[in-house]
Amino acid sequence: MRIGVYLAHPSPGSFNAALFAAVVDELRGLGADVRPHDLYAEGFDPALSAAETETVADVPASADDLVQAHRAEVAELDALVFVHPNWWGMPPAMLAGWVQRVLVPGVAYKLGTAEGEPAGLLKAGRALVLNTSDTPEDRERDEFGDPLQRVWGACVLPYVGVGELRRVVFRTVTDSDAGQRETWLREAREHARALLEPRGV
């Protein structure tokens, strides 16, 4: 099973980085073909070019070799994992740019016309999103409407054909201690293992 794991946090010492490492280690230990990507460490350029803004072309042009490599790889994956913090109710700009530059028409979805219903093209049927947050759950839900759930669960993943999403939020991170973080890392490993379970389990 080919699984892409994407980290979007600029600090190598962050808890997000620890989650990323735990997920990669767990999946590799179970025999998965893991494709890990620390987007900041790779130097991924999140800035969308004018040539990439066409939404009905087969595949928008890009002169960036790293973008092209990500596009080719994501089309062949069986599952996706995204690890990132909640910043202002959004993924970091790095990951938003990855979505905009990599999940493009002809790779991740197809439109008959600009007004047509999308057809998701990705093989990946499952996704796991691991978020960190310093906002209490009730405030995130009641005041803000859990915007990251809308981003991943409504706007992005269904659009590209991913039908099964599991999203887990670890909160609040700033005031957590080492014991709590170890518990969260174990939970992240459990959620990663679930990606390998047969459908319907």
Image (cartoon, rainbow, N blue to C red):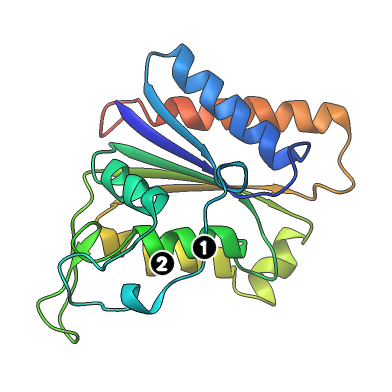
Classify mark 1: helix, strand or loop: loop
Query: Relative to 178, is 172 above or below?
Result: below
Along the line of sight, the residue nearer the viewer: 4 or 119 = 4
Q: Position of residue 110 (x, y in %)?
A: 16, 67
The amino acid type found where label 2 is placed reads Gln
Along the line of sight, the residue nearer the viewer: 57 or 119 = 57
How many badges with numbers are in the image? 2
Distance in Å between CA atoms under marks 2 and 1: 8 Å
Q: Position of residue 153 (x, y in %)?
A: 42, 61
Rendered-image quadrant of the N terminus:
top left
Q: Earlier in the sequence, mark 2 or mark 1?
A: 1
Q: In the image, 152: left or right of 63?
A: right
Q: Give the crowd class for mark 2: few <14, some 14-19, many >=20 residues within 10 Å.
A: some
Residue 46: numbered disc: 1
| Direction left: furthest residue | 112
Residue sitting at x 73%, y 38%: 12
Residue sitting at x 41%, y 66%: 100
Q: Nearer the viewer, mark 2 or mark 1?
A: 1
Q: Quadrant of residue 199?
A: top left
**Residue, disc 2:** 100
